[in-house]
Amino acid sequence: MAPVLTNAHTHLELTGLAHLCPTKPMEFTRWIQALIREQALRTPADVRRSVERGIEELLAAGTTHVGDITATWLSVEPLLASGLRGIVWLEVLGLKRHEALERLEQAKAAIEQARRRPGSDTMRVGLTIHAPYSCHPDLFREGTTWCREADVPLCIHLAESPDEVTWLTRRAGPFGRLLRRLGLPVPPAPGLRPVLYLHRLGVLAARPLLVHMVQVTAEEVRLVAEAGCAVVHCPRSNFLLNCGRMPLEMYVAAGVPVYVGTDSRASSPSLDVREEVAFARPWHGDRVPAKVWDTMLSRPL
Ligand SMILES: [Zn+2]
C-alpha cells in the first residue's frame, strides 16, 4: 500500500480561483471580501471543473487522504468517486438565526443521503459550521448536538486571524465593516476569545477538527487537549493572510494531534502538503523536533 500522505484542509471547489492567492501578505477581511465577490459569479459548472482539477492536483502530489470543505456541496460526488480517503464536510453558515437553522436542516438531509452512497465508508461525509464570526451561536449549538447524536464528523475554522479575536472579544476591527458592507446582522459580542467561546457553547465536546488555531493562549490549548480535538496547520495561508504563526510547539507539548493542510488555492500556492512543510519548517525553527513533520503528514484522516 502507498504510504499515507494527508492534506487535512482544502476547499477543492476554489481551485479555479488561484488568481486570488496573495503574492505577499494582505489583510484577511480584504481577501474574504474578494473571495465572496468572485464566488457569486461562478456557475455550478465552474465549481465542478475546480473540484476535478483540485482532485488531479492532490493525486499528482501523492496525496492519499484529504479533508475537504464544500460550501456548494458539489465536491461530495467527485470525492466519493476519486479513490481518495478522508472526510468531505458540507458547510453551513449564517448570522440570521432562522436562515442558518433552515440551512442546517438541509445539510443534515444531504449528509444522511450521502452517507448511504458507495464510497462513503472511506470518504466520510461530515458537517462544517464555518467560523464563529460567520455563524449564529444557535447554529453551533444545534449543529454540534446533531453531530454528536448522529456520529457525524464536525470541522470548524477557528482562531485564525487577530481580527477574529478582536471581533469576538470587543466587536471592534475590520470584521464589523465587512458584515455591514454585506448587510449582515451583528449578534451581541460573546466577549470571549474564539476557543473559549466555542467551549462555552459546548462545541468542543463534539471533538471537532479545528482548522488554523493560530490565535490561542496556553489555556485554550489545554481546553482543546482535554476535549480530545485535533487541529490543522495551514502555514502558507496563515502567512499570506497575515494571521500569524501557529504556536505548533504548544500543541505538540500538549499531545494534541496536528495535521497539515494547504487550504484552498485561493490562499495557497499549491495543494502539495510537502511544500507546506518546506515553508513551515524554517518559520517554526527549532521550536519543534524534526520528527514531528513526518508524523503530521502521515497521520490518516
Ligand atoms: Zn479553509
Image (cartoon, rainbow, N blue to C red):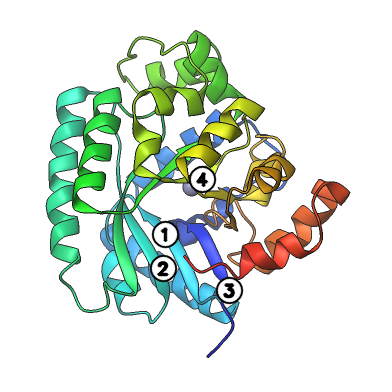
Q: Residues within 10 Å of mark 3 (few under 14, many from 20)?
A: many
Residue 232 vs 67, above or below: the answer is above
Q: Which residue is mark 4?
A: 211
Q: Which mark is residue 86?
A: 2
Q: Earlier in the sequence, mark 2 or mark 1?
A: 1
From the top left corner, tell me how far across and down residue 133 is, in percent. Answer: 42, 26
Residue 289, quarter of picture? bottom right
State whether label 4 is within 8 Å of ligand 1.
yes
Q: Is residue 164 left or right of residue 107?
A: right
On residue 68, the disc is 1
> As drawn, which residue projects farthest toward the bottom?
1
**Mark 1 and mark 2 in contact (Cβ < 8 Å)?**
yes
In the drawing, what numbered circle is on residue 5?
Answer: 3
Q: Are marks 4 and 2 in contact (CB under 8 Å)?
A: no
Q: Is residue 47 visible?
A: yes
The residue drawn where x is 68% and y is 48% is: 252
Mark positioned earlier in the residue sequence (3 or 4): 3
Residue at left offset 31%, top offset 79%: 81
Residue 75 position within the rendered picture, expressed as x and y whole percent measured from the top left: 32, 64
CB within 8 Å, label 3 to label 4: no
SS at badge 4 = strand
SS state under label 1 = strand
Q: Residues within 10 Å of mark 4 (few under 14, many from 20)?
A: many
